[in-house]
Amino acid sequence: MHVAVGARHDGLSVEDHCVTAHSRVMLPRHQTTSPVDAVALLDTAYQQAQLGVAEGGIPIGAALFSADGTLLGEGRNRRVQHDDPSVHGETDAFRAAGRQRDYSSTIMVTTLAPCWYCSGLIRQFGIGTVLIGENRTFAGGEEWLRDLGVDVIVLDDERCVAMMTDFIADHPALWNEDIGVVDGGVHEARSEKRETVL
């Protein structure tokens, strides 16, 4: 696995790290705490994604953790199961965590790069670190989050890549619905029109 670490809040650069499945990774925001096992955190989100696909949904899982790795809430994309397009993995985990006084030291873990909707949630509540299982099949707002000072770590997890690759191949219409692509081009046309108007 490969961990790509974004810019830290203190302005120092962070080198990329190669980790094995059993490595413990010190998340950049939490330099004063003991190492947090990034793969173990991702396992929680991955299990949620597996539950989602078993229910006939989209296999994206997420979990919100405190800085020391304590699970606050977990969830999965349930837009199909609940017939609710707002129930993404990250929003489901966020809701399950309940109210927190401060999110700056929390870690949002997700099997797939967060979409713009979920990136907005991360930004709105000031979640300090985002741990992403993979961003090969979908790239959302991770660069935007980095630019805003959020610590973004990408684990190039083969399980997550295989899970999404297989799902997209088997359910392209459902996947396109989830990411806002209609009839293979309407989403792009909307983006171009929006740029013209601005």
Image (tube, rainbow, N blue to C red):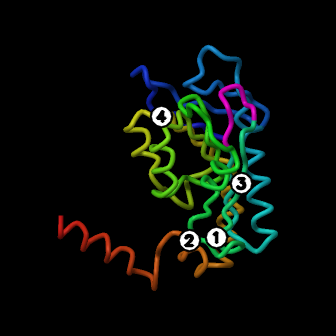
Closest to the camera, between mark 4 and mark 3, is: 3
- Identify the residue position indicated by label 1 in the image: 79
**Which badge, 2 or 1, is on the more N-terminal residue?**
1
Magenta stretch holds residue 7: no
Q: Nearer the viewer, residue 12 or 32?
A: 32
Verify CB contact (< 8 Å) between mark 4 and mark 3: no
Q: Residue furthest bottom?
A: 183
Q: Residue at x 76, y 55 (%)?
A: 48
Q: Which residue is mark 3?
A: 75
Q: CA distance from mark 1 to mark 3?
A: 12 Å
Mark 2: few/some/many CA within 10 Å (<14, 14-19, 20+): some
Give the secondary structure at mark 3: strand
Q: Residue at x 45, y 43 (%)?
A: 123
Earlier along the polypeptide chain: callout 2 or callout 3?
Answer: 3
Report the Cα–Cα distance between label 4 and label 3: 25 Å
Q: Measuring 75% from the left and 32% from the top, which residue is drawn there?
A: 70
Q: Is 170 on the left or on the right of 193, as rendered? A: right
Give the label, 2 or 1, closer to the camera. Answer: 1
Q: Nearer the viewer, mark 4 or mark 2?
A: 2
Q: Residues within 10 Å of mark 4 (few under 14, many from 20)?
A: many
Q: Which residue is mark 2?
A: 178
Q: Which percent across, then down, holds residue 43?
A: 77, 45
Report crowding for label 3: few under 14, some 14 to 19, many 20 or more residues within 10 A (C-alpha).
Answer: many
Q: Secondary structure at mark 2?
A: helix
Is residue 54 or residue 84 the one in the foreground?
Answer: 84
Of labels 4 and 2, earlier in sequence is: 4
Residues under labels 4 and 2: Cα distance?
A: 27 Å
Answer above or below: position of 2 versus 31: below
Q: Tags 2 and 1 in contact by the CB under 8 Å rule?
A: yes
Element marked by disc 4? loop
Which residue was labeled with disc 4?
Answer: 6
Q: Is residue 183 above or below residue 127?
A: below
